[in-house]
Amino acid sequence: MTSAAAGPNPDAVGVVAARHLGPLLYALEVCAVAMDEAERPDDARYYRVVAAELAEAGGRPRVTTD
């Protein structure tokens, strides 16, 4: 196991994100709607961009440059 100081393990994070992709996308949209209602459009846009990136990456194998 690596220390927290080493940063997140991208492979492990990807596995967890893939396993829970639907609920994560829903939660991000709930956050975006809350930001819209609070008249914080930049914050809403941020959550939607993150959700779009996760959705686009979902189901895609990791690309290596080796």
Image (tube, grey):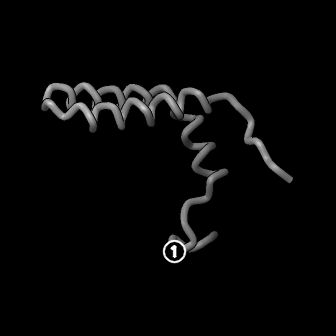
Task: Work out which residue is located at the far right of the displayed protein and give it.
Answer: 66
Horizontally, is 23 left or right of 64 in the view?
A: left
At 39% from the left and 26% from the top, the residue drawn is: 26
The image shows residue 5, relative to residue 51, as above or below, that is: below
Task: Work out which residue is located at the far left of the displayed protein and give it.
Answer: 38
Which residue occupies the foreground of this view, 48 or 8? 48
Looking at the figure, which quarter contains the N terminus?
A: bottom right
Mark 1 surroundings within 10 Å by alpha-carbon count, few (fewer than 14), some (14 through 19), many (20 or more): few
At 58% from the left and 35% from the top, the residue drawn is: 19
The image shows residue 8, relative to residue 57, as above or below, that is: below
Location of residue 61 (image quadrant): top right
Q: Disc 1 marks which amino acid?
A: Ala
Would you say residue 5 is visible in this rendering? yes
At 14% from the left and 30% from the top, the residue drawn is: 39
Q: Position of residue 27 (x, y in %)?
A: 35, 31
Task: Work out which residue is located at the far front of the displayed protein and give it.
Answer: 42
Secondary structure type for disc 1:
helix
Horizontally, is 57 left or right of 25 in the view?
A: right
The image shows residue 40, relative to residue 12, as above or below, that is: above
Residue that carries the numbered disc 1 in the rendered image: 5
Which residue occupies the foreground of this view, 61 or 49? 49
Would you say residue 24 is visible in this rendering? no
Q: Position of residue 18 (x, y in %)?
A: 59, 35
Location of residue 57 (image quadrant): top right
Q: Position of residue 4 (x, y in %)?
A: 51, 70
Count every numbered label the image shows and give the total: 1
At 56% from the left and 43% from the top, the residue drawn is: 16
Location of residue 45 (image quadrant): top left
